[in-house]
Amino acid sequence: MNHALRILLLDDDAFMLDLLQDMIAGLGYSHVHADSDARSALRALPGFRPDVLVCDLSMPEMDGIEFLRAVAEGGFDGDVILLSGMDSGILRAAETLATAQGLTILGARNKPLTSAALGDLLALARGRATPVHGDGK
């Protein structure tokens, strides 16, 4: 099993968070940290060191844009998948902003995300996270 990606899920909707976790487990990924609060997710980042962030845009207190700004300022160099129930114009604007902050956006998708679409994005991330052959340093 070549599914060693570390995935951080962030969505304030508990049902959506459970659904995403189930889909990711069904796709064979097991290194997952799920959070419904952006500030809590930020605190988890340094210890968990995810390869991929799956982030909802619309959340109370600290929204996805603010979260991504903080992540970018912290030097996150993994991949980001944006999710939103809002219209696609907002999703595109968020993708543009996050890219401008130096983040790598694998995809910006409307909810609900299908398991197949999520699998495709995670496979893309896995391909990008493959270590270069060498001495491992």
Image (cartoon, rainbow, N blue to C red):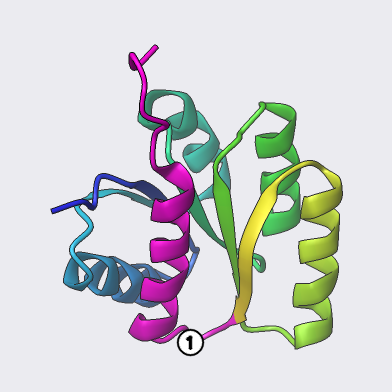
Name the residue at the left extreme. 1
- Residue denoted by label 1: 112
134 in relation to 137, above or below: below
- Circle 1 SS class: loop
Q: Which residue is drawn at 66% across and 27% down?
A: 75
Where residue 79 appears, as percent x and y from the top left, is 56, 49
Res 83 → quadrant: bottom right
Where residue 111 appears, as percent x and y from the top left, is 54, 84
Label 1: few (<14), some (14–19) or many (≥20) C-alpha neighbours in 10 Å? few
Q: In this view, does 73 lie to the left or right of 32?
A: right
24 in relation to 115, above or below: above
Q: Which residue is drawn at 84% across and 62% down?
A: 96
Counting every numbered tag in the picture gives 1
Which one is in front, 78 or 18?
78
Which one is in front, 104 or 30?
104
Q: Is residue 17 left or right of residue 29?
A: right
Residue 58 visible somewhere in the drawing: yes
106 in relation to 40, above or below: below
30 in relation to 72, above or below: below
Q: Residue at x 33, y 47 (%)?
A: 5
Q: Does the magenta stretch include residue 52?
A: no
Q: Is residue 118 magenta?
A: yes
Residue 9 visible somewhere in the drawing: no
Q: Which residue is drawn at 41% across and 63% down?
A: 122
Name the residue at the front extreme. 134
> In the rendered view of the protein, which quadrant contains the C terminus?
top left
Where residue 103 appears, as percent x and y from the top left, is 71, 45
Start and end of the magenta stretch? Answer: 110-137
Tell me which amino acid carries mark 1: Pro
Which one is in front, 88 or 14?
88
